[in-house]
Image: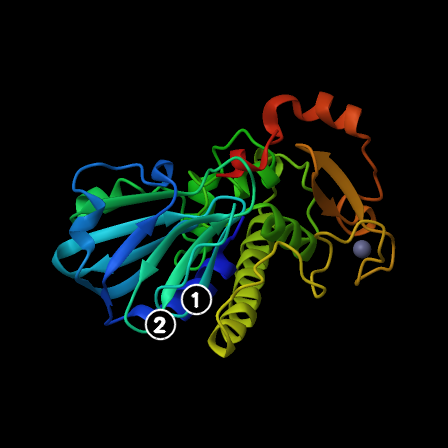
Amino acid sequence: MPEYPEVEAYLAALRVKTEGQVLRAIRLKSLFLVRTVDPPLASVHGKRVVGLERIGKRIVFAFEDEHFLVLHLMVTGRLRWRKPGAGLPGKAGLAAFDFDEGSLILTEASTQKRASLHLVVGRAALAAHDPGGIEPLECSVDEFRAALQGAKHTVKRALTSPKLVSGIGNWASDEILWEARLSPFKRVRDLSDDDWPILFEAIRATLTVWRERYVAAALESFPEKVSAFHPEMAVHGRFGEPCPRCGKPVQRIAFATKHESNYCARCQTGGKLLADRALSRLLKDDWPKTLEELE
Ligand SMILES: [Zn+2]
């Protein structure tokens, strides 16, 4: 799922391509994509894009007259920029947004279509789409601690809960916890006074580094290869490879079919490995069963 750094990269690219441009039409292949009926989607046809914004992991197109299109890509939704009027690709194509200079194509690779598009009018209606998580780059460590410390979750779950923290999903939380040398199994209530600023700084450093990397690439060319993996990541997607800090093999926790979370046992859990069965006993319902639960 595109997280804060990738969403910021999309926003940077979309600002270049669409800000100030008139949206001529939206071509829909899947009616299911659009979750609002009033006002009709066609009411943004002919309106100018006045800004691009982010709410959590959602992309917001702001139009004239306070019309907002709220796009949630979910796990496999992606965007491409093509020539004006370009056709929608076979199975994956969901919608095209036609501008004079090009067409923005929305695809979703999985058979289960989860990406969503809402059209709302007015700032109050837009605010209703905010899950409420704190923006870690726009708060102090004290505000961050106050927002999280009542959580009964593990740190991993708290970081990826959009009601608690904005924009962080599976990969960024893996990288943040490695950076902070914190176990993903640690409970929020067990974080010490020393842990909080370390965690907070790890979040800010990780999100900033990856945002800068992805935004710079997006300004070179429209981000078409957005994925949760990158060779420069420390632990995420690197099961069995050496930890870049200590050289020990990166461990994994499987959850949901095909998905996993990664950590370094030496750096983060005092060398402790937890088998999946032991883990599920320990965490009971605290571990996400599906990637969608991270949203
Ligand atoms: Zn390590």
Q: Is residue 143 left or right of residue 51?
A: right
Please state the horizontal and vertical placement of residue 292, each as a whole percent of the image. 53, 36
Label 1 Cα crowd, 10 Å radius (few <14 / some 14-19 / many 20+)? many
Asked whether the beta carbons under mark 1 and mark 2 sit within 8 Å of each other, the answer is yes
Q: Is the CB atom of the residue marked by disc 1 within 8 angstroms of ligand 1's nearest atom?
A: no
Residue at position x 16%, y 42% from top? 39
Disc 2 residue type (three-letter): Lys
Amino acid beneath label 1: Trp
Query: In the current view of this chain or complex, which residue is farthest to the right?
Result: 248
Q: Is the CB atom of the residue marked by disc 2 within 8 angstroms of ligand 1's nearest atom?
A: no
| Near-viewer residue (189 or 66) | 66
* Mark 1 and mark 2: Cα distance apart in space: 9 Å
* Sequence-first tag of 1 and 2: 2
Disc number placed over residue 17 in the picture, else none: 2
Answer with left or right where residue 41 lies relative to residue 148. left
Q: Quadrant of residue 23?
A: bottom left
> Would residue 54 be seen by someone viewing this image from the given angle?
no
Query: Which quadrant of the render holds ligand 1?
Result: bottom right
Q: Which residue is mark 1?
A: 81
